[in-house]
Image (cartoon, rainbow, N blue to C red):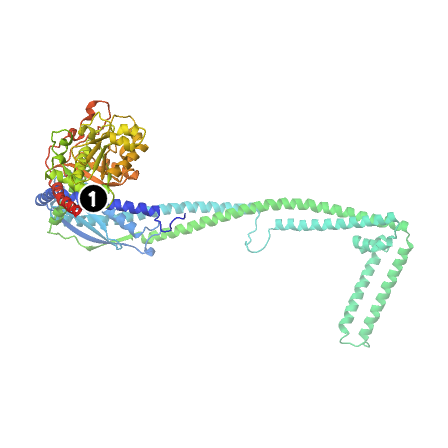
Amino acid sequence: MHASYNATPPALVEDSESTLDAVRGVVRFLQLLQRRIHVVGAIALAAFAIGLVYFLLAPREYESTAKLMIRQQAPDQVSSISEQSSSDTIMASQRELVRSAKVVQAAIDALPAEYRVDLINAPPRDWVDEIADRLHATAIRKTEHMEVRYRSADPEAASAVVAAVIDSYIRFVEKSHRNGAADVLEALKGERDQLNRKLSDKQQSLQTFRQRIGHLAMQPDSGVVEPIISRALMLNESVMRAQEKRLELEASLATVQQAIANGEDLRRHLALIEEAVGQQMLLAALGLGKEDAELLVKQQQSLLEAEGELRRISPYLGPGHPKTIALTKQIAATRQYLASYHANAGQKFDAMGSGELAPLLQNMLAQSVTQARTREHQLLVSFEQARAQAVRQSGDLAQLQMLEREVARIEKQHDVLFEKIAAVDIHQVQAPIRVLTVQDPLPNEAPVSPKLHVALGGATVLGLILGAMVVYVQDLLDDRFGSPEEMASQLGVPVLSLVRTLETTGGVGLDAVQMHHGGDDAELEAFRTLRTALALSGDASDRLVISSAEPSDGKTTVSANLAVSFAQVGKRTLVIDADMRRPGMTTLMNLKGQPGLTDLLLAEGSVSQLAEQVLHKTAIERLDIISAGPRRPDPAELLAGPNFADLLAWADGRYDQVLIDCPPVLAVSDAQIVGRLVDGVILVVSPEKNHRRLVSRACESFVAASVNLFGVVANRISEKTGSGYGYGYGYGYSYGVDEQDDEVIAHESDQPSAVIAADWNELAGGAKLADDFGEQQRAA
């Protein structure tokens, strides 16, 4: 089964119910005010009289007003020592300053004695508070204006006080600013002297440190490196080259040693050896001599120069030119010499055997390796020393940079402080705000207090509010229903009938029932009205439960009179006394000790046969009664059993109307159990006795049990029912074994010492017309 898409969300239902409850509460309160309008009117009238007396007797007060324009100076005209406040903050501060003790005291000192009329009865120590209480300063929003007002018993005094306060305020602002500017200037100069001393000490420390570390004054962006650091870098490069040279010599030595070990021809390795040890060293080792080497170098250089000269002049001089011929011969002779020299050297080298060449080459390479290692070691030692010096130099340079930054920071602070001092010197006489009087305080001969409309109107409004509060409190303390409309509105069910206080007949059985005597008494018309309301309700009302919220509300009296009313119009009526704890109907009809409902519910067999045995006929032809029978400790279980449902089915086939007298619903659950088996329930309410919350709880209990509640019957209506307060109630519905508990409820009820109220009487008086209309409809 799918949920309906049109279902109202629970949240919306709760909101609508809350709104409806609020509306009902407001409507009820308005109705309550309408019923007790005399209380509200009396209090409002008293308040109006008090307001009138106050207006006539209150002393007159006069007010004088001045208007000031408080303008903040432009940012370029004001010292930037502190951040400027917003306009609203400035106006709020100035407003408080106008009413400050110092400003008011200075104004009092300057105020002539004849204008101190408000201070005559006050001691001098309270003068400031007296003036401040009467003085008001108000900032006009979104403007630079402020109003200063003062109230006094004399109009001239009010004007003089305002003028004195404004003059005192302006002097205070100017004096405070000058004193403040002088204090700030003195503080800034002291801070400047401290910065000067600190700057001098830092600069001296910087110079001393530079001299100690031998720092060269170079620009940071010049790209020049410190000499010590540069020397360390150069030594590092030399060490790297020496290491490369040593590695090359060691590799050449290893190659030659391997060749010697393998018996290879060492002449193939001469180029490697020449590259490693150098050409001159190799020639010297071969015995060619230093002079030969130098001559060889000169010849090679001469050859290169001649070849270069020839190439230079060839484009300009022909081959037959004498200079060209001479250069050509010189180049040929030099080449021939070099060729013969190399040939001789080769022949000499070829003449050397392997036995002579191997030791020679090996010794030369070993000596070169040793020299390379020595040079590398020396370079490493020098590099380590240079690196240590460079590290110390780097630390010194970092500390030097820190000192330089510190000096620069102090110099910047000094410059800023100098600018502040210059600004204070220039503008120390200019206040941050400028005060102008745009409206002078003038005497006002018309009093501002008290005002007739304010005194009378305010008193009347307060009286109405107080009256409404009194009515509300009275209603809370009373907690009774004030009218049928209020009862129907709060309970959510109609008021079916209004039953006045009935006089006891003094009889027994049917003679104790007022309707049995007949007549056209207004008290009896209520039962005919109830009968007609049930007939015209539109719902089936053949089987009814009659209950109450509390004991002694008169439910048995209403049940008996309603039953007689039904029988009198020709309806076959059966009354069942289902109150097996305190059987009021049984006692009323003098049926105590007779078999009844208890015997029927406990018996086994056909309910229709047993019902005939416990049925009691009355003097009225169409009215029968089933009494409660013997008392039982479990009446609720008996009523929930199958026999009671069979009894109702049997009665439904023989009777036109079945009335069941049940116990109060707030005392036990019998009425709820029986109410689910019948057409509906009638709740009897005694407005003078029952509290609203208890009656509401009784109605809610029926609704919670899904019982159809036709409405309520207001019983024992008297003169004070609608407005009677102070009536108590007793919730003494006990179920003991004392025989005194069997007294008739209709007789044991306390008779209210009052007559019928007018508002309820009108509704009850017109009930007969509706009943007659119902009789005519049935007859037709």
Left or right, 724 with respect to 540, comes to: left
Q: Nearer the viewer, residue 214 or 140?
A: 140
Residue at the top extreme?
738
Residue position for label 1: 535
Q: Is residue 336 visible?
A: yes
Number of marks in picture: 1
Q: Residue at x 11, y 51 (%)?
A: 446
Q: Is residue 112 visible?
A: no
Whole-percent x, y for residue 68 in the image: 22, 53
Whole-percent x, y for residue 408 in the image: 47, 50
Left or right, 589 with respect to 89, comes to: left
Whole-percent x, y for residue 563 in the image: 19, 36
Whole-percent x, y for residue 178 in the image: 29, 49
Left or right, 738 with respect to 86, comes to: left
Q: Residue at x 54, y 53 (%)?
A: 220
Q: Residue at x 53, y 48 (%)?
A: 401
Secondary element type, mark 1 = helix
